[in-house]
Image (tube, rainbow, N blue to C red):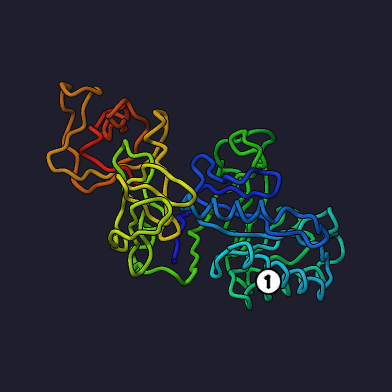
Amino acid sequence: MTTLLPSKSYLTDVSEFQGPDVAYPYSKGTLVKLMQYNYPGYNYARARAQIASSKAHGLMTMGYFYATFSNNFDKAKTEAEFACKKAVELGLPKGTYLAVDWENGSGNNIYCGVSSSTSAVLAAMAVIKSNGYLPMFYSGASAMRNQLDYKSIVKAYGNCLWVASYPIAGAVNSANMAYFPSMDGVAIWQFTDNYRGLHVDGNISVLTLKTDSGTSTAKKGDDLEMTLHPVAKWDIDRLFVVTNKNGCNLYDGPDLKHKVKTLKCKSVWKVLDEKGGALKLGKNQWVDGRAGITKSNPIATHDNIGGRVKIVLPNTHALYSPNADSKKAYKLTTNKVYHIVGRKGRFLELKDKYKGKTVYVTGNRAYVLF
């Protein structure tokens, strides 16, 4: 499946210190810690659950491993091989990003010389690439600039840096790009270790990220809509998008034993319930959740939240107030995408394009692209 994640998208990275559910607010992607070579008791079951959760929520799913090879060339290759093996075992698809987390402490020493450290990191990334994953390198901005030759890494693997630099301490809700540590080759910026006060690292994609697990049936140009933005009415909590090339079997119960019909690839369905990995789409209508992707719509359950809305019915107008008898402000353009700033019941709140004030559109005349 080819997945595109636009620039300025939020991501989180998790380890065994976070729970199995990785559906954090506004997050569009997850980097899961797979292993630490000198830590034989690592919680692989938690990592497997986090990867599964990220996939189930339709997030871009990536991985990383904590390096303990310091500047040891041979050990770097050994650890990377083990990480790639674990990635497969834990369900991380090949064709996605796998990062080397190289920082000081917990068995790793970054003060061993720029040349040898750079060579070791490049050796690990070469192993990652040879195993079918996309190499990425993580460390703090200071370590990248002073303890190795990060420009050599960028020269070898392009925009592959995942850099940590925190402008302020404490809980941070959003990335302030004015404080971005300007460096060549940065793909992801980790801007806080306490995203929205949830005690999880917060990141933002500096560039568009692209993964390809090799299982997509979508045509070129369909990828973003298929993987990240299935279309929903304002009041639908959750959607299921069929991504299997040959469609998806529909069954008469959650045991998935008696087939009723086949749903077409790229068809979109409202999810009513879930039981043991089976998704309920209607009365006595169930599918295997692995046959597609699911996406939750926070706008359906939260009033004060942003997003995008596409006007799908002609003669739709912005209204001055959230009620059916409101005076019309102006006509909205069919098939144009507008930014949502909130919701009042079935009315979506938009910013007035002329005066910057709030106007409203009836939710059943538009679709949310979340």
Residue at x 79%, y 62% (from the top left corner): 37
Instruction: Give the left or right position of residue 11, taking residue 340 as reference.
Output: right
Could you tell me which quadrant the N terminus lies in? bottom left
Q: Which residue is mark 1?
A: 125
Q: How many marks?
A: 1
Residue at x 84%, y 53% (from the top left corner): 106
Instruction: Give the left or right position of residue 122, taking residue 108 as reference.
Output: left
Where residue 247 sits: x, y (%)?
A: 33, 65
Where residue 206 sits: x, y (%)?
A: 53, 54
Instruction: Give the left or right position of residue 5, taking residue 117 as reference.
Output: left
Where residue 81 sits: x, y (%)?
A: 72, 73
Q: Residue 261 is drawn in which quadrant?
A: bottom left
Q: Residue 44 is drawn in which quadrant?
A: bottom right
Q: Secondary structure at mark 1?
A: helix
Q: Residue 326 is drawn in which quadrant?
A: top left
> Which sits in the foreground, 302 or 69?
302
Q: Is residue 118 above or below residue 181?
A: below
> Which sits in the foreground, 219 or 215?
215
Instruction: Give the left or right position of residue 70, taking residue 23 as reference.
Output: right
Residue at x 60%, y 44% (from the top left corner): 202
What amino acid type should be assigned to the residue bearing mark 1?
Answer: Met
Pick out the residue farthest to the left: 315
Q: Is residue 283 above or below residue 327?
A: below
